[in-house]
Amino acid sequence: MTDFALVGDAYAAHSQRARGRLRHDLVARRVLAELPTGPARILDAGCGDGEMTLRLAAAGHHVTAADPSAGMLEAAARRLAARPGLGSRVRLLEAAIDTLPADGERFDAVCCHGVLMYLDDPADAVARLAGLVADGGLLSILTKNRAAIGVREALRGDYATARRLIDRGGDTSVGHLGLPTRGDTADALDDLAREHGLAPLPWQGVRIFHDHLEDTWDPGGDAYEEALETEWAASWLSPYRDLARQVHTLARRQEVVCHDRERHPPR
Ligand SMILES: C[S@@+](CC[C@H](N)C(=O)[O-])C[C@H]1O[C@@H](n2cnc3c(N)ncnc32)[C@H](O)[C@@H]1O
């Protein structure tokens, strides 16, 4: 795709509103729950303006935040500068997934959120990302849910587009930024993770009941919390999660256990 910074301001505005925040809150809650308590080394691939990077660094983790867009990295750097104390835990790197350094560095978690939908084919990207996950480490992918193609459009009353997407069973539709985005199913992403030696964890559907609302949706404090908790509860369960706009898949690389060969000789 062309430089994402062209729609960066619109994306930043969306991220700060309730619909955008809902997604970040759900995804961050799960990722933080899966991480070790001690400081972890994390790669945020396609970090954009750094929302997840900032959340992870604020939780005490060390984050390499990579994005091919200089403009998005500048936005991330500006947000980082406004949060004294986090800078020492964040390294910004101008790199696309396929140019990420393969110099032997491995991460306790590799996050790639909201990026695969802009790539023609997820397989190479997942292979690259999985290769950067350390033993015992986590791969966290958030992308558009192919299984729910047309749901947003139908709930908004755009039946012509919904019918086209549903009848065709396609994988591409136009997202809220006006860009075409491709979807993947959780099953396909779990299969890719397995191919690269990672064991899938339960996946979640992200934004089930509130996706079709406009960004003007603005519930107050308690109403937002109730919406968030309802989304969280349903996010694990079919059939609710199958209709979510996005899928959050996670997979873990098995820890290598070194046996003491003297005390436990192999049988
Ligand atoms: C929708 S934003 C998501 C940003 C952030 N991960 C988040 O969840 O808020 C998509 C980001 O993916 C980046 N991107 C596009 N193609 C990429 C690629 N091949 N490798 C890594 N990042 C890419 C864009 O520059 C943009 O910053």
Image (cartoon, rainbow, N blue to C red):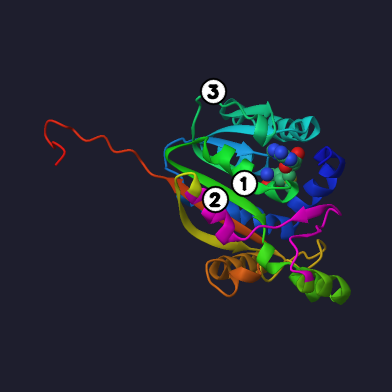
Q: Residue at x 53, y 41 (%)?
A: 130
- Spatial CA distance of label 1 from label 2 is 7 Å
Q: Are marks 2 and 3 in contact (CB under 8 Å)?
A: no
- Spatial CA distance of label 2 from label 3 is 23 Å
The answer as to whether callout 1 falls within 8 Å of ligand 1 is: no
Ligand 1, by image quadrant, is top right
Crowd band around label 2 with a 10 angstrom C-alpha radius: few (<14), some (14–19), many (20+): some
Which mark, by number, is residue 192? Answer: 2
Is 117 inside the magenta-drawn segment? no
Crowd band around label 3 with a 10 angstrom C-alpha radius: few (<14), some (14–19), many (20+): few
Residue 245 visible in the shown view: no
In the rendered image, the quadrant that contains the C terminus is top left
Which mark, by number, is residue 123? Answer: 1
Q: Quadrant of residue 25?
A: bottom right
Residue 11 visible in the shown view: yes
Q: Are marks 1 and 2 in contact (CB under 8 Å)?
A: yes
User: Furthest residue to the left?
Assistant: 263
Which mark, by number, is residue 12? Answer: none
Q: Which residue is mark 3?
A: 103
User: Furthest residue to the top?
Assistant: 103
Which residues lie in the magenta part? 168-194
